[in-house]
Amino acid sequence: MKRLIVALVAMLVVSLCYADELPKTANIKCGPWVVGVSENEMTIVWTSTSRCMGWVEVAPDDGSSFYAEERPRFYEDLMGRHVISDVHHVRLTNLKPGTVYRYRLFQQCIDDSGHSPIPLSRVTASDVYSQRPFAVRTLNKGKEEISFTMINDIHGRDSIMNALTKDIRANNPDFVVFNGDMASFMGSIADIEKDFMIRASKNFSPNFPLVYVRGNHEARGPGYCEFLNLFPTSTGTPSQMFFHGPAAFLVLDCGEDKPDSDIEYGGTAAYDAYREQMAQWLKQAVASEEFKSAPVKIVLMHIPFENNAGWWGNNELKRLLLPILNEADVDIMLSGHNHGYSFRKEGSMKGVEFPILVNSNNDRVDVKVNKKEIKLNVLDATGKLLHEHVVKIE
Ligand SMILES: [Fe+2]
């Protein structure tokens, strides 16, 4: 009996040592999703089960097999090296406007603990044989009518997230907007995945570009600094500008809603200075020829301007950003934050020279835009049309 126990222990030790030496294989953990899309570029983001090197192969959507030829590879490079990480952001470049690209994700674990990196495992890839490859379309300034869908204030509620996004593939919008507060606070990357990105990955994100407007709740929690890691922008802040069809889009970060000194922020808040910097960026953005020449101008900001004196953050946004936006010929602002629907017509709010649609936390807004008008349909989680608005472009 004693010999048997010794033999079993020896076998266990050998098997554990062997297991430790087995090559590690990384797989997709969550994603992919597509951010920072323009007419010519986009960033593919995904997380992997292990730290690894990730790359993307791209093929045209021409009906050919992905295996018909060697496809161009794109890596994430930093200071001359392919990045090894469990969060991957691969920028695809030299793309054509309004064009569908198929893509495939690859991963390989690398032992980079010593001075010579050693490939550890077989390469894994997303399936392009038994499943359709991921595919996504670039934006196109020449498109006459564009469409997008917007949700906000999900606060990690998977059932409502699923109900509002399950038909995105069927509805086929040009992109999807998260207008803030998708989670109540930013925990670990695993928490962020669980709160909304696993559902987004299942329902649409490999195939439809994502525009993420940061809300005040994404400014909370230890994972707040993961926002740009998971949803990178070309500006290095959540505020950005992009163009599609006849429209210019301004994505504006809002910061927090209470004074920086509020006990809720524990002395960590510095949003007053941050909003001042954002106003400087906005002044430059709206002064650009590309913005000024766009026939339609749409602002996406989580916290709406209010008619009466509001909370500190709201008042500061009004003081710093509203004069710039009033001068910029804005056609509409789309917001969330209030957990209730409202439509403030142009001229109905003192000092605000454009309409504002505030979407509730339980509905989605489907938007169509051409040179003449912006059509906004607010639908509930069952797809029932609740409100309809048409904003004429003057
Ligand atoms: Fe909010």
Image (cartoon, grey):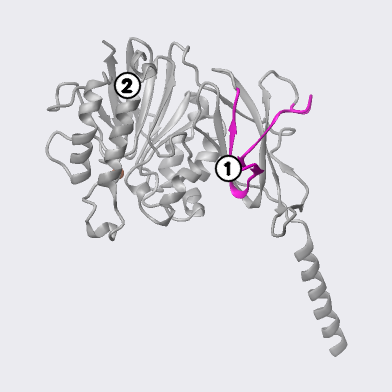
The residue carrying mark 1 is: 46
> What x and y, as percent, mark residue 142?
47, 11
The quarter of the image holding the C terminus is top left
Task: Tell me if 109 is positioned left or right of 301 in this view.
Answer: right
- Whether the magenta-drawn stretch holds residue 375 is answered as no
The residue carrying mark 2 is: 287
- Give the residue at x 71% y 19%: 63
Eye-nearest disc, 2 or 1: 2
Please rate how many residues cluster around mark 1, counting C-alpha atoms within 10 Å: few if below 14, some from 14 to 19, many from 20.
many
> What x and y, as percent, mark residue 168?
48, 29
Q: Is residue 365 above or below residue 120?
A: above
- Give the residue at x 38% y 52%: 185
> What x and y, as percent, mark residue 304?
24, 35
Whether residue 81 is visible, yes or no, is yes
Q: Is residue 116 above or below residue 384?
A: below
Please rate how many residues cluster around mark 2, counting C-alpha atoms within 10 Å: few if below 14, some from 14 to 19, many from 20.
few
> What x and y, as percent, mark residue 348?
14, 24
- Whether the magenta-drawn stretch holds residue 77 is answered as yes
- Give the residue at x 40% y 42%: 160
- Give the residue at x 36% y 51%: 184
- Kind of element beneath mark 2: helix
- Kind of element beneath mark 1: strand
Judging depth in this view, the residue of 310 and 112 nearest the camera is: 112
Place residue 65 in its image quadrant: top right
Q: Magenta stretch?
A: 66-94
Judging depth in this view, the residue of 208 and 292 nearest the camera is: 292
Tell me which numbered mark, 2 or 1, is placed earlier along the sequence.
1
Whether residue 1 is visible, yes or no, is no
Task: Tell me if 41 is positioned left or right of 357 in this view.
Answer: right
C-alpha gap between disc 2 and disc 1: 35 Å
Place residue 389 in its image quadrant: top left
The amino acid type of the residue labelled 1 equals Trp
